[in-house]
Image (tube, rainbow, N blue to C red):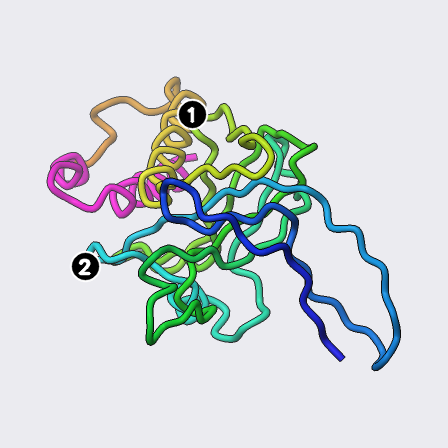
């Protein structure tokens, strides 16, 4: 028998239902009492956008990635790339709570719900992120290298996924460039790649440049 345990979310000024205690799903025998202590938590809410600029919902992450409920599409690490405990759970805004959606899981915004005693800093990784003309990638957001600090207990931090993934990838590109600057000069960089940077999708350009550095290395 599967039961779910969570404290009813508190709706804040941003109209997001933020969990006060960590949601859990657990398996137990029928008619067997279980005592569970749920930790106090804070949340990182993932706010990503599709090509048409509409919000990516839980169902979008599932369908573009693992393709089935229960499979992972996001996780959290520390700055040393060591995975850290977090529950990925849907958070509902006004639109998701309205009829006929009625807070169905597929309409929620994914959140990483974290024990508030562990403040970070953290990095957030999203798997199966679709980069136009490049494919699906596992990408990291690290807040410009500083990591994200967990907000106070019961609070939330909304992560602009598109922006943060691109910012981290660009910073990583500069870091890689510094490794190879003694071997690569401006003359080595094809002019057609330079001209593609302006007016193109940022992540697409970033990964084209990454491929070049790997090739030159």
Q: Is residue 209 magenta?
A: yes
Q: Which mark is residue 66?
A: none
Q: Is residue 198 magenta?
A: yes
Principal secondary structure, stretch drawn in magenta: helix
Location of mark 2 (residue): 52
> Residue drawn 58% across and 40% down?
42
Residue 32: x and y in percent read 88, 75
> Residue drawn 38% across and 66% down?
60
Mark 2 surroundings within 10 Å by alpha-carbon count, few (fewer than 14), some (14 through 19), many (20 or more): few
Helix, strand or loop at mark 2: loop
Start-end of magenta stretch: 191-217
Residue 198: quadrant of the picture: top left
Helix, strand or loop at mark 1: helix
Residue 79 vertical placement versus 84 (above, below):
above
- Considering depth in this image, is 203 or 147 the residue closer to the camera? 147
Location of mark 1 (residue): 175
Residue 36 vertical placement versus 171 (above, below):
below
């Amino acid at each position: 028998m599967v039961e779910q345990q969570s404290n009813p979310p508190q709706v804040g000024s941003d109209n997001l239902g933020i969990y006060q205690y960590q949601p859990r799903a657990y398996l137990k025998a029928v008619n067997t009492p279980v005592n569970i202590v749920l930790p106090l938590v804070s949340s990182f809410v993932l706010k990503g956008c599709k090509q048409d600029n509409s919000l990516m919902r839980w169902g979008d992450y599932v369908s573009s990635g693992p393709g089935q409920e229960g499979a992972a599409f996001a996780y959290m690490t520390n700055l040393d790339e060591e995975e850290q405990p977090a529950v990925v759970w849907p958070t509902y805004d006004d639109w998701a709570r309205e009829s006929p959606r009625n807070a169905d899981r597929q309409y929620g915004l994914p959140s990483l719900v974290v024990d508030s005693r562990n403040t970070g800093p953290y990095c957030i990784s999203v798997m199966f992120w679709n980069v136009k003309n490049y494919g699906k990638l596992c990408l990291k957001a690290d807040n410009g290298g500083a990591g994200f600090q967990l907000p106070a207990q019961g609070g939330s931090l909304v992560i602009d996924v598109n922006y943060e993934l691109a910012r981290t990838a660009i910073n990583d590109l500069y870091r890689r460039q510094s490794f190879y600057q003694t071997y690569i000069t401006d003359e080595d960089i094809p002019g057609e790649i330079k001209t593609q940077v302006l007016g193109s999708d940022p992540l697409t350009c970033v990964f084209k440049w990454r491929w070049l550095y790997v090739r030159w290395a």
